[in-house]
Amino acid sequence: VDDSLRVVQYVRRNPQRFDAKLPARPRELYGTRNANLLAVSSGQGSVLTVLRPDDQPGKIALPAGDAASTFWGDLVAIAADSAVVLVEPEHPDRKRSIPVDGHARAVIFSPSGHRFYVAQREGPVLVYNRFTREQMDEIDLPGAAASLRADPFGRWLMVHPQGSDSLWLVDLAKNKLVDRFHCDWAVDLPTVTNSQTLLLKQGDDVVA
């Protein structure tokens, strides 16, 4: 995405410009399985733009809040304080709302897209079945979570505590907090490698 909000995709290293441009600067970008691009932008209200390579973009109004997408881009979730709103980009009329009592502040899908996790302003992280939209479990934490990050393989959940440069590591096989680490948060770290090694950023160092 360039400064004029034009989008270029690269196919086999060849640039292909989308016919239409984004309506506003995006805060989140998600790819999809059908070459469309999903962009979440914030202004007076949040908007999900479905940008197609050779067609006019579709726009879906969203409630304010943290957003997440499945790996394939077939479902978007928004942590909208009193509820989690689920939107299918290809079927915008199929919005679903799941009430949340503890003020939903962050949401993330598992890599497979079968589950999603909701951090609350108060209380545990809630675990939901994506298909039934029913709560499956909850994960107790020492305090409030500011944001969530999943590892690429669906085994670990990394929790950024509110107001703290640290990590709470959750084992998703048991939905239990297993350890705490002091670390900085960046776009790419902390993360877990394919050899099940946790990588942390601590000052100028990367610690394994």
Image: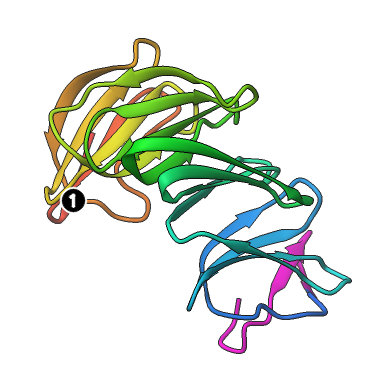
Residue at position x 43%, y 32% from top?
A: 117
Q: Is residue 170 above or below residue 35?
A: above
Which residue is denoted by mark 1 in the rendering? 184
- 182 vs 77, left or right, is left
The image shows residue 94 at horizontal and vertical percentages of 73, 45
| 152 or 133: nearer the viewer | 133
Q: Which residues are magenta?
A: 1-16
Residue at position x 38%, y 40% from top?
A: 149
The N terminus: image quadrant: bottom right
| 167 or 135: nearer the viewer | 135
Q: Residue furthest right?
A: 54
Q: Is residue 31 above or below residue 152?
A: below
The image shows residue 93 at horizontal and vertical percentages of 76, 51
Q: Any magenta on residue 199?
A: no
Q: Any magenta on residue 7?
A: yes
| 76 or 168: nearer the viewer | 76
| 182 or 143: nearer the viewer | 143
For residue 150, say whether it is visible. no
Q: Residue 113, located in which quarter of the rendered image?
A: top right
Q: Is residue 136 above or below residue 188?
A: above
For residue 90, say whether it is visible. yes
Q: Residue furthest bottom?
A: 4
The image shows residue 64 at horizontal and vertical percentages of 45, 61
